[in-house]
Amino acid sequence: MDSETPNSSKETPHRLSVVIPSYNDGRFIRDAIASVEVLPRELYEIIIVNDGSPEEFTLKVIADLEDAGYHIIHQANKGLGGARNAGVAAAKGEYILPLDTDNKIRADFIMRALQILDERPDISMVHGDFQYFGETNTLARIPPFDIKKMLRRNYIDACAVYRRSMWEACGGYDEQLPVMGLEDWDLWLNAYTKGFKFLHLDMIAFDYAHRLDSMFSNLRKEENWRASEEYIYKKYVSLLKEHYHDYERWDYHGGELRRRPIRTLFRLFTNAYYKRLHNRIYKVF
């Protein structure tokens, strides 16, 4: 690209590569891009991966963006993991931000995350809280990384800033998951097993579109969730063996059963998910 396209800079190499996968979601992508473009222009590059979208409107939006000079990668549909991998593989930045088309990043979070990664070589990923918009409007406060809670379920969204070197060491996102949508969970667990450290910032990192027709709503179907969860547990069975006995006394928020018996017992009795989880982990063993 020449020096006047939206993804170029004469002055310094881009430090941050923003990877935006797109599949039939042309109605959202411009808002995602706009949220990035409030950052200093020399700081970032944007890579859009068209993951085999057949929808005419999305293809028209992608074509317009390509004509405007944006870096577009076209590929046959590989799913979210394959789309992110293609974008990161083409990235030039030291740091990566995966940004879904229906999310909008907060600039102050990006600047703080980059500062931390610059100053602290021991930290490889920075994440924060997020604000829902659309069909609901609530603030999701995300706890810091805890392997016990992370083994129970993924609570850290893919929209985080991490070192490209971490992605390389992990071999990228797993493209073999039975149902797309938990690639970020796999990456965080994979990175943990290799000794990478995560840091949570007590601030809103991004705005998250709450939609009933999202990919995650399909993942939440019982059969899809169970297949993906079982795949993850088999892959990280060594972590489960190391931490499994803690499940009986930890609730989702990390409080011990001994310390919060009433609330934890109420949760256990009223939510059958915990028993199903216990049975599935036992079957893996």
Image (cartoon, rainbow, N blue to C red):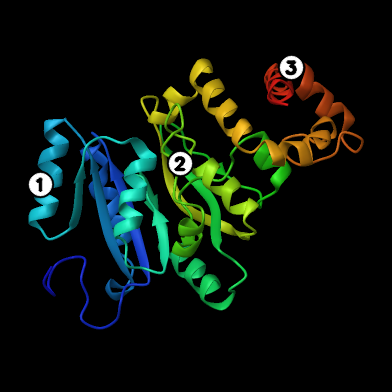
In the rendered image, residue 76, in percent from the top left (x then y), is placed at 22, 37
Give the structural element (helix, strand or loop) at label 3: helix
Per the model, the C-alpha gap separating discs 3 and 1 is 50 Å
Is residue 146 among the parts visible in the rendering? yes
Per the model, the C-alpha gap separating discs 2 and 1 is 29 Å
Splitting the image into 4 quarters, where does residue 5 fall? Answer: bottom left
Q: How many marks?
A: 3
* Mark 2 Cα-neighbour bin, 10 Å: few <14, some 14–19, many ≥20: some
* Above or below, 100 relative to 257: below
Per the model, the C-alpha gap separating discs 2 and 3 is 33 Å
Residue depicted at 51% across the width and 53% down the height? 170
Splitting the image into 4 quarters, where does residue 128 fall? Answer: bottom right
- Label of residue 270 in the image: 3
Which residue is the extreme one toward the left? Answer: 67
Q: Nearer the viewer, mark 2 or mark 1?
A: 2
* Mark 3 Cα-neighbour bin, 10 Å: few <14, some 14–19, many ≥20: few
Residue under label 2, please give it.
174
Q: Nearer the viewer, residue 260 or 243?
A: 243
Q: Quadrant of the N terminus?
A: bottom left
